[in-house]
Amino acid sequence: MINRTRRLRKTANIRRLVRENKLTVDDFIYPIFIEEGEHIETEIKSMPGIKRFSLDTVSKELDELTALNIPAVLLFGIPSEKDDTGTETWNDDGIIQKAIRYIKKEYPNLYVITDVCFCEYTNHGHCGVLNDLEVDNEATLVNIAKQTLSHAKAGADMVAPSGMMDGTIITMRAALDKEGYYDLPIMGYTVKYASAFYGPFRDAADSAPSFGDRKTYQMDPANRAVGRREAAFDDAEGADILMVKPALSYLDIVSDLKNNFDHPIACYNVSGEYAMIKAAAEKGWIDGERVMMESLLSMKRAGADIIITYFAKEAAKILKRSYT
Ligand code: PBG
């Protein structure tokens, strides 16, 4: 036999030499939940190791992230007041705005990305303004512009809209440019599916819809081609980074975007993906550490340049001791 692929698998060193993809700490964005109030440090039951913090307790988390050299955080806010349109999202003294100012002041080297959405801020838990039982796209865009500018004014480094309204990126770009924020990038939650993998997040962020589901705005898990259309629109509207969410069950989409677009591609390794690995590891059914590293690596192999993951700290620690 001339072709024997095992020749290049013989030892750890030759495997190192021919390895196509490597994880590094530079790949990671760590999501953080920040709740209005004081002395809050609440464990999220379905996400072991992940907590909700108030601004007076979050420094230990931020210290750890900077010590591990994790480049960026993605902020989610949990307000004390909710209403039917989510007006708190554009309150310049809202929880996210305060969090941005605090982090940029105390941790100037940490890159701060904000989730731009309404579901944590509306009393019905949907991602925008309701018109009857439907989320009204155009009315929501008006509020998205307000929320975006409020995050920009507070000092966000990047904004990331997750609501899946059509025309979101161009609305945000226009609002930002009009106020002079030409250089503030937008990461689109470009291809976001209506997924059951968000279950634990909705506990964490207190954002489950009180009725119905998100199937009229988030994508149908059965569909692939429309993911490329979504990406083409976000590209045309000026998105700087294209994201796929969830990650593991949608690696075909990550690969489609990588092959068809020249933007950096991000994927969101979501709460349910985290919870499954944690739960099976806790039961002793899998080696949690190795399954975590293998699944993160599979996202890179599929084409992700950036991975948003609750595993960021654990993976960074392993990478520090040089994982082979
Ligand atoms: C919406 C939003 C969601 C997530 C991030 N942003 C939930 C949803 O669309 O219902 C999910 C993230 C995760 O599951 O880790 N603001």
Image (cartoon, rainbow, N blue to C red):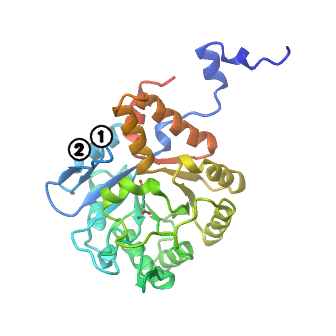
Identified at 70% across, 18% down, the residue is 8
Q: Nearer the viewer, residue 242 or 84?
A: 84
State the mark number for residue 60: 2
How far across and how far down the image is residue 12, in percent? 58, 16
Looking at the image, the residue that sits furthest to the right is: 2
Identified at 82% across, 19% down, the residue is 3
Relative to 7, say whether 31 is above or below: below
Residue type, mark 2 in image: Lys
Identified at 44% across, 78% down, the residue is 145
Q: Secondary structure at mark 1?
A: helix
Q: Classify residue 283 by image quadrant.
A: top left
Q: Is residue 69 visible?
A: no
Q: Is residue 177 visible?
A: yes
**Badge 1 local density, few (<14 within 10 Å), some, or many (20+)?**
few
Relative to 309, say whether 214 is above or below: below
Q: Quadrant of the N terminus?
A: top right
Disc 2 within 8 angstroms of ligand 1 (CB): no
How far across and how far down the image is residue 38, in percent? 14, 59
Relative to 285, say whether 189 is above or below: below
Asked if marks 1 and 2 touch (Cβ < 8 Å), the reply is yes
How far across and how far down the image is residue 215, in percent? 51, 69
Identified at 60% across, 22% down, the residue is 16
Ligand 1 sits in which quadrant? bottom left
Left or right side of 69 for 169:
right
Q: Classify residue 69 by image quadrant.
A: top left
Q: Nearer the viewer, residue 252 or 104?
A: 252
Q: Classify residue 18 by image quadrant.
A: top right
Structural distance between the alpha carbons of marks 1 and 2: 6 Å
Looking at the image, the residue that sits furthest to the left is: 39
Residue type, mark 1 in image: Glu
Q: Which residue is mark 1?
A: 64
